[in-house]
Image: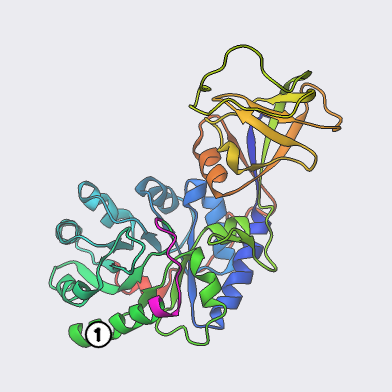
């Protein structure tokens, strides 16, 4: 088979989704599945839907459009603040979008009026991670202006934590969001149906807190795809960590000195010279490089060690493994490696397991469809 290739076990994704969906449902929280690390793969999205997500979200309009054009029947949410230049596209393809900017809301409103539709808006609030979001003290006032724009409907509030600055979602942060929801509802005169507390980083809080407050949605990608939580990269109990495997081919296998010789400077990517142990290394070169995956995010088979990587070569110490030129080596991936492998034009993606295309999938969640044409 062609290499490098990324093998996806769809059954593992469904299993992880179902496990998290069941646990969170007991706490009144649903899941917006996020497949952005897989370029909005319809098969991955369908596996998530089969596992119980209420709808799908993605940060790129290209992926939203790919999902919309597929056979899936699911609510679609743009989970990155829309580009003003893409307002027409957003309204055409997405049921809902996360927003922070008045000028973008104006553009979405104009596009929705032209299309004679209603676009749902979740207003994002800044709670300390310093990525997207309006200041909490401005949230009530800005939320009250959304419904004044024709073609828009305020569906809810949301926040994002841990992605930029590593600020942990905790009870104080979630209580603050819940309090803002109640203030906004009083101001606008109607209930908010979507209160999106964050992403996979919220799972520790969500599954342990005695009080989830008004939080009823989490945007989950990494924990479903990789079976880990992103705050400490710990495996989550009951989830599978083997949904993705990156397979690449050995193109050279030789025993070489462990130490380079000659005068040294920076490597091709600015690294300092590598100083390994003395003696020799049974070294394999794999046809896989930084153009294909993040080498720091790859886990080789037990007994092998990643030594270095250039654009097109991954160098391994293969120890006592029985290998020959032409053999395949399979790697586990973290989120960074998965993201780069999925976006590399040189990596083929193979979906394994039970492909859910054509299966009956969940209808669009009423939280969103009541505001969409």
Please report the residue visible at 26 percent of the width from the left and 62 percent of the height from the top. 99
Is residue 26 left or right of 193 when viewed as pictured?
right
Q: Quadrant of the N terminus?
A: top right
Density class for disc 1 (Cα within 10 Å; few <14, some 14-19, many ≥20) is some
Is residue 78 left or right of 42 when viewed as pictured?
left
Q: Nearer the viewer, residue 159 or 56?
A: 159
Residue 353 in the image: x percent, y percent?
70, 52
Please report the residue visible at 26 percent of the width from the left and 57 percent of the height from the top. 91
Residue 239 on the magenta span: no
What kind of element bears circle 1?
Answer: helix
Q: Nearer the viewer, residue 327 or 76?
A: 327
Please report the residue visible at 56 percent of the width from the left and 45 percent of the height from the top. 338
Image vertical order of residue 346 relative to residue 352, above or below:
above
Residue hosting label 1: 183
Whether residue 272 is visible here, answered yes or no, is yes
Please report the residue visible at 72 percent of the width from the left and 38 percent of the height from the top. 330
Q: Nearer the viewer, residue 141 or 23?
A: 141
Residue 92 in the image: x percent, y percent?
28, 54
Residue 218 in the image: x percent, y percent?
46, 69
**Which of the 4 quarters of the picture holds residue 15?**
bottom right
Q: Main secondary structure of the magenta part?
A: loop
Q: Quadrant of the C terminus?
A: bottom left
Which region of the structure is painted magenta? 164-173
Count of numbered tags? 1
Image vertical order of residue 364 relative to residue 209, above or below:
above
Is residue 11 left or right of 303 when viewed as pictured?
left
Residue 143 in the image: x percent, y percent?
20, 74
Residue 168 on the magenta span: yes
């Amino acid at each position: 088979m062609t290499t490098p290739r990324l093998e996806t076990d769809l059954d593992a994704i469904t299993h992880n989704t179902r496990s998290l969906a069941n646990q969170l449902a007991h706490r009144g929280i649903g899941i917006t599945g996020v497949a952005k690390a897989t370029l909005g793969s319809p098969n991955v999205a369908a596996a998530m839907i089969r596992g119980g997500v209420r709808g799908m979200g993605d940060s790129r309009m290209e992926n939203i459009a790919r999902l919309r054009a597929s056979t899936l029947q699911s609510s679609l949410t743009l989970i990155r603040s829309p580009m003003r230049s893409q307002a027409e596209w957003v309204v055409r393809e997405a049921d809902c979008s996360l927003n922070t900017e008045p000028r973008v809301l104006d553009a979405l409103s104009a596009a929705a009026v032209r299309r004679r539709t209603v676009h749902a808006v979740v207003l994002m609030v800044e709670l300390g991670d310093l990525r997207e979001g309006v200041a909490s003290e401005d949230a009530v006032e800005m939320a009250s202006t959304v419904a004044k724009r024709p073609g828009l409907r305020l569906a809810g509030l949301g926040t994002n934590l841990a992605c930029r600055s590593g600020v942990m979602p905790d009870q104080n942060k979630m209580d603050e969001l819940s309090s803002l929801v109640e203030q906004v509802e009083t101001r606008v005169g109607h209930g908010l149906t979507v209160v999106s507390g964050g992403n996979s980083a919220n799972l520790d809080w969500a599954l342990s807190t005695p009080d989830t407050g008004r939080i009823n949605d989490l945007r989950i990608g990494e924990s479903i795809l990789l079976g880990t939580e992103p705050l400490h990269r710990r495996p989550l109990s009951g989830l599978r960590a083997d949904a993705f495997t990156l397979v690449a081919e050995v193109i050279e296998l030789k025993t070489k000195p462990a130490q380079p010789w000659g005068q040294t400077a920076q490597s091709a990517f600015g690294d300092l010279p590598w100083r390994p142990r003395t003696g020799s290394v049974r070294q394999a070169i794999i046809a896989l490089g930084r153009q294909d995956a993040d080498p720091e995010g790859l886990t080789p088979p037990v007994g092998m060690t990643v030594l270095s990587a250039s654009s097109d070569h991954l160098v391994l110490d293969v120890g006592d493994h029985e290998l020959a030129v032409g053999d395949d080596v399979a790697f586990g991936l973290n989120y960074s490696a998965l993201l780069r492998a999925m976006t590399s034009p040189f990596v083929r993606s193979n979906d394994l397991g039970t492909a859910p295309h054509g299966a009956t999938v969940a209808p669009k969640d009423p939280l969103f469809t009541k505001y969409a044409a």
